[in-house]
Amino acid sequence: MAKERKKEKRNFVYPQIPKTPTGITGLDEITQGGIPKGRPTLICGEAGCGKTLLSLEFITRGALEFNEPGVFMAFEEKSEELAMNVASLGFDLHKLQADKKIKIDYVHIDRSEIEETGEYDLDGLFIRLGYAIDSIGAKRVVLDTIENLFSGLSNQAILRAELRRLFHWLKEKGVTAIITGERGHGVSLTRQGLEEYVSDCVILLDHRVINQISTRRLRIVKYRGTVHGTNEYPFLIDEDGISVLPVTSLKLEKEVSSERIPSGIPALDNMLGGKGFFKGSSILVSGTAGTGKTSIAACLANESCNQKKRCLYFAFEESPNQIIRNMKSIDIHLQKHLDKGLLKFHASRPTLHGLEEHLVAMHKLIKKFDPDVVILDPITNLVTIGSVSEVKSMLIRLIDFLLEEQLTVMFTALSLNTVINEQTDEGVSSLVDTWLSVRDIEFNGERNRGMYIMKSRGMKHSNQVREFIITDKGIDLVDVYLGPEGILTGSAREAQKLQEQTEIALRDSAIELKNREIDRKRKVLEAKIAGLQSEFESAEEELNRIYVQEDLVKKIKESNRQKITGLRRGQEDTVKKKEKR
Amino acid sequence: METIATPYELRLYVAGKTTKSVTALANLKKYCEEHLKGQYVIEVIDLLVQPQLAEGDQIFAIPTLVRKVPEPIRKIIGDLSNEEKVLVGLNIRPFNID
């Protein structure tokens, strides 16, 4: 059989084998398009792991979404019971049957009613199935659970030969078939070794209970001729049917945005280069108990709602009403956003379901609500239901998904160990883009909160410790004081502030005194200068007076000399005449 | 012991004229003639002709013999080669026991 197919493949080189979408959320992503078209697929798992639901969803979604009618051959449950089971998912099997979209054929096998004598074959089943397929033109077939034949009939040799023939026949018919089988004991996938017959695609469902918490998982054991995800994927059964979460994306190719969103605390925005967080980044707020992590988260929620953005708040610790009431005390009113539908709370106990199912549930809620900001408060509580590594792997996938969706996410985390508070319990610190740490600073007989940015990728951010104060007006950050004994917070900071004010006042008065003294000195000097000036003037006058006197003396002397000279040259007559006259 | 007042209504489901079907019909006729002479009706249904009838009687194996009357319905699958099993299955007590 295998050889045949290989030959076939060589002849027809498909880029991918043709696939039939199942319509089940997530499963088509993992299988990259669905289950192999026109071939049987085996779904195996233990009792109660969702085989029947998965196959029934395959049929109904096929009929509703892909217009491919289907036949559901039930060996376990009656048509009525099946209809009841999926009625809660909103599938109306009665109507679908009436519309000839699907056909449910219940095959009743009861050993007590049956005797076997001699040779027989399962042509009856073939004819029934063939008739059902032809009557509605079915493209999809489910046989659930064909292994029941083994409990009803004793001739194994005939059964095995007939099953082989059945699967061949289904292929010839060209229908895409799902065969379900109970998980076998030991290594075999199914009790009756159905995997031997169905070799194209085998999907294993699993329902595990670890630490009293159940988790459903799905794994593609094999899928010939195509690439597929090989991991175990968690899945959830809820009111919308099955959702599988292809959580581990293989690529790191997400888009980035340089748009900023404010944190709702202006001082914090200032610390983050003045603008706040990047849109689509992940923010971790860690701190010890009672340091105000939830308040920071509520601030972000409030701010983004004020900007008409949608915010989804996952609360794992407090109920929505509790958060709303508590935040009112610091002037953050969330109720109005809730009423407007911008804010949505989803409160659940971590122990409600397994980690993976939490992830699926979050995934679904996020897809449904389409928020811009997601808050998880706190992630620490998830540790109660999983180991650190499990929580980490879950958070990685969650962050991955959120970043792909360009959502901003804020986690709060309680650090239990105050000594090594560089480390969060969940070990997500390396994954996040921005990490705010809120720490208790114990000093001077009081506890105060200090906040610092441990890291913030791609932006200039403050390296300072700020004191983080929660008042009735909201949250504020204040510069902490660096005193001789280290950083000062709370009342010590206030005291320091007062002291500084006193110092300033003292200095001011000292300066005033000095100024006055200078004034006085100037006045004294000015007076001195005036005295000297007048002294100088009188001296000058004195000098001037002497100078005039000398001049006068000189003039008189000159005239006297001239007179004397005249007398000596015989001009005595004249002189005499003159004298006579 | 002559309480077999109810006639037997037997229905044999076959799919075409296969060896098994032919053998089964031959065997059935033989047993009935032996043990239920005059008290039985055999209806042969070929599912290749009337596939819609397979669902009603919950037929999955071929050939299947269904005892419609008397109640409860009993089914015997196979070519009916083991006489004893067929008689037990149909709840027919052989005459020669008396």
Image (cartoon, coloured by chain):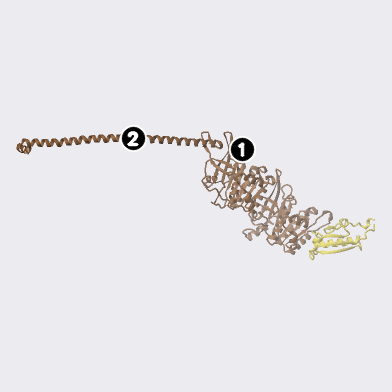
In primary-sequence order, the first of circles 1 and 2 is 1
Q: Which chain is yellow?
A: B
In the image, A495 versus B41, the foreground residue is A495
Q: Residue at x 42, y 34 (%)?
A: A513
Q: Are there few (<14), some (14-19), or many (20+) residues within 10 Å of tag 2?
A: few
Q: Position of residue A243 (x, y in %)?
A: 68, 53
Instruction: Give the alpha-carbon distance from disc 1 to disc 2, as whole Å.
Output: 76 Å
Residue A232 visible: no
In the image, A376 versus A236, the foreground residue is A376
Q: Quadrant of residue A551?
A: top left
In the image, A501 versus A525, the foreground residue is A525
Classify mark 1: helix, strand or loop. loop
Q: Is residue A236 above or below residue A507?
A: below
Q: Identity of the amino acid at label 1?
A: Asn
Classify mark 2: helix, strand or loop. helix
Residue A329 visible: yes
Q: Identity of the amino acid at label 2?
A: Ala
User: Residue B76 bears which disc, if any?
Assistant: none
Circle 2 chain: A
Q: Which chain is brown?
A: A
Q: Quadrant of residue B1?
A: bottom right
Q: Which residue is mark 2?
A: A527
Q: Which residue is mark 1?
A: A417
Q: Residue at x 22, y 36 (%)?
A: A544
